[in-house]
Image (cartoon, rainbow, N blue to C red):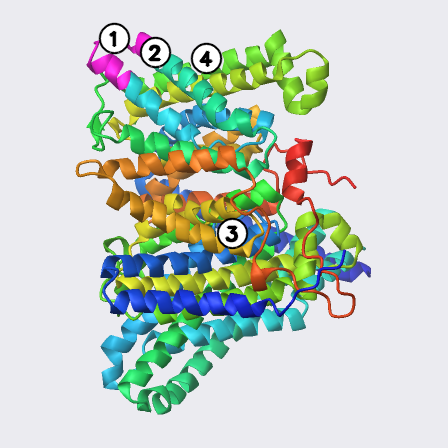
């Protein structure tokens, strides 16, 4: 390549970069200018609120996938059961917020452990697709069984919040105590989870099981117990997520788990499935995308799912195993 | 081991096929079954067509697709647009959307051919390689991307022009052929055109979606196709903003109810013959080899990417045809018939019947319809809600008791692998142990 040609190309490159940058700046300033910076910040904060709830669900997906390579489609429905458990605890028995959240975590844990024992454990050595189909079956069962008249009923139920809603005005941006509670509880649970996985013996056993089951068994790890524990931990997070989601969006019904479940799962995949920080980052991204699309794209509230999955596909094309995923190694 | 057959396997199969056809015709004409059950039988048969497509993609080619319902929906809406326009516009000698749909497909084909002829992919790469000799890597990347974008834009523009010109010509041709036919015949011709076009549109979309996505690993591909299905669903819910007759979330109504048993059965037989002959051809063996071991297939000189898109497009075609039949069965389309929950149906059917077994898919489709609709009949008054409580329990029990599905990978009659004419040994259509099972053992 001759020197002048190189200069021409380099100039073209900078021209392209300048045009792209100008377009980006214009877009951002247009979006911010459309309804003012306060509106933009508000969307970011609402997105974070949604993202933190997604994170609680996504972690359950990613942990279960990491350890048994199963897409647990019933996880979204466990999340729904968590919402309903806390609903009954609060409105029927008048429990406070913290007991209700603990109660629904407990209910979800026991439910998920039972599901694992009944539906997934017998299929541990079967083709993976068999377990996936039973997961879909369990999902259907939970949705339609709880929709029966004498269980939860098929109607939308208004969720009674266990505490009054306070809204603080910070320079025009409205922050409610719900947002603060969601973020605090999620971060708390994440820290506990990180501690369990990273610092305890059980956590070490979980990591070992995820890495190599037969070897873990040889090392004296109770693999079945660890798998059950993983399901229980994931369900506990989903239960807490169910309560927080219902507090943020106080309309619950038995199919409420489908879309948040899928979104959270996609968030987990977006971040790189099997990776816990990945699930967290992916969920935050997903929440932000959801809210930003609704706030700024024309017809956004109707098209938000389209955008969310479109971005997933774009991420896949650039990085096929998600943001934090390790590249798949083909071994011969 | 030699396996000689007393007489050609297709004879008993053809007899059974004719018997099934006549049995349904007889049962309907002598009022043994109600119109409701007549429709259920048709629904079972057209579900089988769609499930066969998925079995080709997942069961035979090993690509875990959760987005099959998207192609089904595209076929349904595409063909419904054509026939509905026929009803409303053709009396005024107008062609409606048929010419646009055909011309659009032709335009996309032109674009694909142009992109192939201009070697857009390799031009981009070569430009990058050349630019890297004098520039930094990121600079070369951006400039080469610019070259690629310009080329792509040129191709898209050319194909748009081709579409526009073709549409004008097609209108004239259709006005002088199909429109001149007597109405009863024209109706059948249009229905056939609508079904085929529903299939080809779905196949084309499958090709375009599969081209980038089929590189992904198995589970990631599943999620990406699931995303595709949800995108189609959301787009359909808002379709009224683009095409008013699609009516979006209110549901498309007044589609002619032309689907009859001969149409559905004919479609099923044609698709089955295509699929069986594809699978036992040399291309088909290559398709199955991709499922068994992608790396080994590559080292044998098999173009893995091409075969994946082939299986994916043909599977999409079947789903599109099935969707067209479905649209004209009830005369009403609503996006909720194509949501994620319904999207699991074909997957459940093929796993239930046995992955990689065409016979299994046929049996499972019938049983699926029987379970879903039979429960409606069996359950007493006031317990209708229990239908979808009992159905997943049945599903769970079947999966727990028979993990390989009802038929595993075995086939029956003419659907079995044919004998190779030279050697009297069965054409190896599958290895004894599928890759999916091997994967489970490893995990």
Q: Are marks 3 and 2 on the same chain?
A: no
**Mark 3, chain letter?**
B
| Label 3 close to label 1 by CB (< 8 Å) | no
Q: What residue is rendered at 64% in x and 20% in y?
A: A209
Q: Which residue is mark 2?
A: A103
In this view of the protein, which residue sits in the foreground, A234 or B167? A234
Q: What residue is rendered at 33% in x and 40% in y?
A: A295
- Spatial separation of the CA atoms under disc 1 and disc 4: 21 Å
Q: Which residue is mark 3?
A: B360
Q: Which residue is mark 1?
A: A95
Question: What crowding class fits label 2: few (fewer than 14 Cα within 10 Å), some (14-19), or many (20 or more)?
Answer: many
In this view of the protein, which residue sits in the foreground, A76 or B438? B438
Residue B437, x across and y down, in percent = 64, 39
In this view of the protein, which residue sits in the foreground, B184 or A44? B184
Q: Quadrant of residue B150?
A: bottom right
> In terms of secondary structure, where does tag 1 sit?
loop
| Label 2 close to label 1 by CB (< 8 Å) | yes
Q: Which residue is mark 4?
A: A188
Whether residue A262 is in magenta: the answer is no
Above or below: residue A111 compared with residue B196: above
Q: Quadrant of the N terminus of chain A?
A: bottom right
């Amino acid at each position: 390549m001759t020197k002048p040609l190189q200069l021409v190309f380099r100039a073209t490159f900078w021209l392209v970069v300048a045009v792209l940058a100008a377009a980006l700046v214009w877009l951002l300033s247009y979006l911010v200018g459309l309804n003012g910076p306060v509106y933009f910040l508000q969307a970011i904060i609402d997105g974070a609120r949604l993202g933190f709830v997604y994170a609680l669900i996504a972690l359950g997906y990613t942990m279960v996938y990491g350890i048994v390579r199963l897409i647990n489609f019933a996880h979204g429905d466990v999340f729904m059961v968590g919402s309903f458990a806390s609903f009954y605890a609060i409105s029927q028995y008048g429990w406070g917020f913290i007991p209700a959240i603990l109660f629904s975590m407990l209910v979800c844990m026991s439910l998920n452990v039972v599901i694992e024992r009944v539906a997934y454990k017998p299929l541990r050595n079967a083709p993976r697709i068999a377990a996936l189909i039973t997961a879909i079956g369990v999902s259907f069962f939970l949705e339609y069984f709880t929709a029966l008249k004498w269980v939860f009923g098929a109607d939308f139920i208004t969720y009674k919040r266990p505490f009054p809603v306070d809204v603080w005005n910070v320079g025009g941006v409205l922050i409610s105590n719900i947002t603060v509670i969601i973020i605090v509880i999620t971060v708390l649970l994440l820290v506990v989870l990180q501690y369990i996985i990273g610092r305890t013996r059980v956590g070490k056993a979980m990591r070992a099981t995820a890495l190599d089951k037969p070897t873990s068994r040889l090392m004296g790890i109770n693999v079945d117990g660890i798998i059950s524990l993983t399901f229980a931990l994931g369900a506990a997070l989903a239960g807490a997520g169910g309560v927080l989601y219902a507090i943020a969006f106080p309309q619950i019904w038995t199919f409420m788990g489908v879309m948040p479940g899928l979104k959270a799962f996609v968030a987990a995949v977006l971040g790189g499935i099997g990776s816990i920080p990945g699930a967290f980052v992916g969920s935050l991204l997903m929440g932000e995308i959801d809210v930003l699309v609704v706030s700024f794209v024309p017809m956004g509230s109707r098209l938000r799912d389209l955008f969310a999955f479109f971005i997933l596909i774009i991420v896949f094309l650039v990085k096929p195993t998600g943001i934090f995923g390790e590249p798949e190694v083909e071994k011969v | 081991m030699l396996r000689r057959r007393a007489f050609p396997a297709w004879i008993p199969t053809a007899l059974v096929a004719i018997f099934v056809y006549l049995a349904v015709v007889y049962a309907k004409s002598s009022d043994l079954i109600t119109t409701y059950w007549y429709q259920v039988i048709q629904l079972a048969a057209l579900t089988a067509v769609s499930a066969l497509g998925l079995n080709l993609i997942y069961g035979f080619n090993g690509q875990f697709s959760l987005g099959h319902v998207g192609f089904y929906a595209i076929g349904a809406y595409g063909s419904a647009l054509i026939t509905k326009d026929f009803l409303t516009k053709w009396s005024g000698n107008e062609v409606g959307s048929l010419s646009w749909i055909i011309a659009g497909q032709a335009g996309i084909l032109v674009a694909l051919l142009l992109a192939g002829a201009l070697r857009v992919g390799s031009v981009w790469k070569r430009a990058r390689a050349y630019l890297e000799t004098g520039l930094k890597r990121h600079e070369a990347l951006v400039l080469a991307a610019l070259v690629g974008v310009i080329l792509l834009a040129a191709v898209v523009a050319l194909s748009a022009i081709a579409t526009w010109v073709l549409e004008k010509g097609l209108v004239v041709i259709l006005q002088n052929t199909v429109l001149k036919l007597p109405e009863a015949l024209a109706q059948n011709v249009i229905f056939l055109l609508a079904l085929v076009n529903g299939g080809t549109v779905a196949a084309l979309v499958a090709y375009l979606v599969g081209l980038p996505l089929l590189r992904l690993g198995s589970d990631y591909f599943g999620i990406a196709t699931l995303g595709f299905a949800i995108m189609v669903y959301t787009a359909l819910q808002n379709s009224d903003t683009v095409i008013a007759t699609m009516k979006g979330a209110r549901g498309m109504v007044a589609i002619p109810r032309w689907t009859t048993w001969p149409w559905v059965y004919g479609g099923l037989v044609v698709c089955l013959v295509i699929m069986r002959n594809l699978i036992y051809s040399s291309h088909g063996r290559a398709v199955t080899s991709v499922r068994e071991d992608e790396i080994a297939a590559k080292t044998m000189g098999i173009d893995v990417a091409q075969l994946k898109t082939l299986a994916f497009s043909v599977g999409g075609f079947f789903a599109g045809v099935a969707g067209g039949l479905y649209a004209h069965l009830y005369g009403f389309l609503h996006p909720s018939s194509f949501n994620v929950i319904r999207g699991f149906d074909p997957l459940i059917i093929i796993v239930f019947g046995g992955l990689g077994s065409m016979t299994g898919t046929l049996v499972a489709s019938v049983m699926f319809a029987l379970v879903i609709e039979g429960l409606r009949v069996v359950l007493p008054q006031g317990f209708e809600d229990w239908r979808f409580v009992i159905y997943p329990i049945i599903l769970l029990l079947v999966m727990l008791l028979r993990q390989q599905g009802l038929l595993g990978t075995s086939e029956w009659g003419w659907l079995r692998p044919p004998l190779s004419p030279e050697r009297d040994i069965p054409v190896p259509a599958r290895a004894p142990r599928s890759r999916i099972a091997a994967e489970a053992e490893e995990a």
